[in-house]
Image (spheres, rainbow, N blue to C red):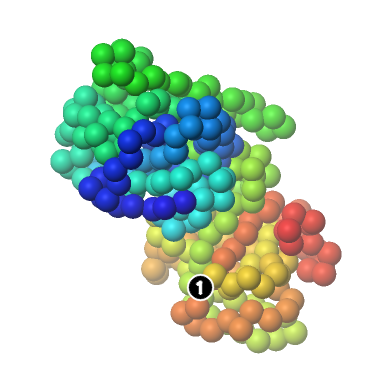
Amino acid sequence: MKVLTDTSELRLPAAVVSIGMFDGVHRGHAKVLRQLRERGRQLGVPTAVVTFDPHPRAVVRPDACPMLLSSLDDRMQLLAATGAVDHCLVLRFDHARCQQPADEFVLTTLLNPLGMHELIVGENFACGRGRQGTVAYLSTLGLRLGFAVTGVQLDRVPGTQDAVRSSSTEARRLIERGDLAGASAVLQRPHEMTGTITRALAASRLVVEAALGRGMCAPAAADYVGSVRQRDDASPWLPAWLRIRDDRETGRRMVRLVTDGTLGAARGDELRIRFVDRAQARRPLSHPEKSASA
């Protein structure tokens, strides 16, 4: 997957396109991306995804901006791992972009540089000033400008309480209330975060305290089972006992983790932390849940 940050860097004669934040690249996103790849194959053209940084609500309504499920780097890795995206265009979202009419956005970002033949998005998608560019609006625009629009239905997630929908909003809600099993069903994987070590204690077991990233979606304060490894490290995941708490002095969400094994952990190092489920009772770390060490 080729990642670009400027429309001037990308000129395609034709493409099938999808747009969205793709925060977490969850089950619903995967369904959209499967259709994107299939249509690309049917038409014999490449696929392109247009996404944004920062989150649009950080500009439009900063007080209502959601906690993110994935950082920009994580989002790119998750999109690439689907195998559905040939080109990813990451656009800076600012006040000028916020005020851009939907018609202008389609012409300057999707048609002229990407040669869009078809737009495939979630059924609740909207773009442009005042969210004018709904699926219905863009379908009408496409009849005039020569592109098709497909709105993909957001399915219910099997096996979850209340039959939640496949959306980033639902994944955040489940994570923030500590329902990591439910969130995993939406994400189709355990929720992961990056933490920066603030303290490491060497004992019979390694005990580490780490600060979680600001603006990232963290589980509710409680105890969890999961796993950990150094960031950007290909070594196996180590089973870990994870305790989330809020630090009143710094305002940061902290995690205290206990694990067997060696991390080579030092203050300032970054860890990759995987949350699997709430801890029901303390268990020996040598017998973690299977998914914690996968």
Residue receiving disc 1: 270
Instruction: Tell me: residue 56, above or below residue 236.
Output: above
Q: Is residue 171 visible?
A: no
Mark 1, Cα crowd under 10 Å, few <14 / some 14-19 / many 20+, is many
Along the viewing direction, whichever of 201 and 54 lies nearer the viewer: 54
**Quadrant (top left, top right, bottom left, bottom right) of the C terminus:** bottom right
Instruction: Tell me: residue 116, above or below residue 57.
Output: above
Amino acid at dot 1 = Glu
Report the number of discs. 1
Residue 187 location (% of width, % of height): 59, 43
Q: Quadrant of residue 252?
A: bottom left
Along the viewing direction, whichever of 204 and 263 lies nearer the viewer: 263
Identified at 64% across, 64% down, the residue is 242
Along the viewing direction, whichever of 251 and 104 lies nearer the viewer: 104
Identified at 33% across, 40% down, the residue is 12
Q: What element does badge 1 sit on?
A: strand
